[in-house]
Image (cartoon, rainbow, N blue to C red):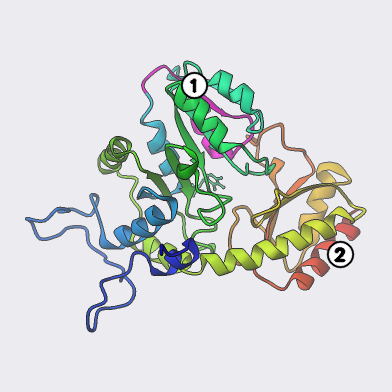
Amino acid sequence: MPESPATRVVTAGRPARTADAALSEPVTFASTYHAGGDVGYGRYGNPTWTALETVLGDLEGGRALTFGSGLAASSAVFSLLPEGAVVVAPDCAYLGVLDQLRERAAQGRLTLRQLPVTDTDGIAAAAKGAAMVWLETPTNPNLDVADVAAVARAARAAGALTVVDNTFATPLRQRPLEQGADIVVHSVTKLLSGHSDVVLGAVVTADDDANGRLDAHRRLHGAIPGPMEAYLALRGLRTLAVRLEKAEATATELASRLRAHRAVDVVRYPGFGTMCSIEVTGGAAGADAVVDAVELWVHSTSLGGVESSLERRRRWPTESPTVDESLIRLSVGIEDVDDLWADLSRALTTAS
Ligand SMILES: *Cc1c(COP(=O)(O)O)cnc(C)c1O
């Protein structure tokens, strides 16, 4: 019987079970290797990356390549595009990814068609003549959910690649390759690493041609992970299933309590995962007052750590205008739910 993903997250990518072998892949600091092997140089490969890539590939159902950040991973994927390509992308998604697309569009290197990820029919129509459909689901920070299978089907019929940024769902909640997507991208920085101490990215695909081109891109352009980062990410990944289960249960409970709070106008929670966004009374100023008033929650950008954190997303100048000025994105960690509620509900009441 195949092991479940919650088991594979623990068991995959381990050294062989031989006497006195370490249970965990050690961190290998090496810029170069003795000649005559398959790797040869530190920009081409590293055993610690390989262990992490084995786990990520196993979880997503493809072959993984790790990169120095999530944005290095998305940049590598965009390097697959021919000059002048049409790309269909969300009107709201992680702002750095959209900024990369806008930069290429401004350089005349691609044409961008942006639609809400929930507009399946619109995306299917826009995919005609496109080289790539980029999805992020649930989206950052509006938490809209796309129909990956339907979009991937339409994109394939149109001859376009489907890429899914799976950072928010993680492979324990959504496996886009099984739903017909061609490529999955991760900011490993977030839930996969889970401890707010690593910046790392990954691309996973079952398409050997795409994998080969992405590997060649990484070798040539050099956006490689550090061995220590790969080690930390793998260490964090081992506990993903329990962290996710705990934080998701807390997020579900907080979403329901937040719906009844008088300082909250809108609660955005997709029904799974550890992210929840709220729109508060009092606009941008009201939201800024909330993030200033919390004591247990951490006011910081990024997400997916064991520590619960929050921020008002529109404080970033290139955040999508579809994001409400008062939206606070909550990244729920693994602290006690009542402690988190006490701090957040007090901050909301004080600020409103
Ligand atoms: C953070 C994030 C990224 C970018 O990843 P970095 O590791 O910060 O480069 C991409 N997509 C999503 C959904 C993110 O949250």
- 233 over 217 or under it: above or below: below
Neighbor class of circle 2 (other Cα within 10 Å; few <14, some 14-19, many 20+) is some
> Which residue is under mark 2?
346
What amino acid is at disc 1? Ala
Q: Is residue 191 visible?
A: yes
Question: Along the polypeptide, which appears first: circle 2 or circle 1?
Answer: 1
Quadrant location of the N terminus in the rendered image: bottom left
Give coordinates of residue 212: x percent, y percent. Answer: 27, 39
**Vertical arrangement, residue 175 with respect to residue 114, above or below:** below
Determine if the C-beta at disc 1 is less than 8 A from ligand 1. Answer: no
Specify start and end residues of the magenta stretch as a single range: 82-100
The image quarter in which residue 326 lies: top right
Q: Give whichever of 238, 286 is nearer the camera.
A: 238
Q: Is residue 153 left or right of residue 225?
A: right
Q: Where residue 77 sits: x, y (%)? A: 40, 36
The answer to whether residue 1 is magenta is: no
Q: Regarding mark 1 in the picture, which secondary structure is present there? A: helix
Asked if 125 appears above or below 269 in the picture, the reply is above
Instruction: Give the CA separation, mark 2 to mark 1.
Output: 45 Å
Q: Is residue 213 left or right of residue 97?
A: left
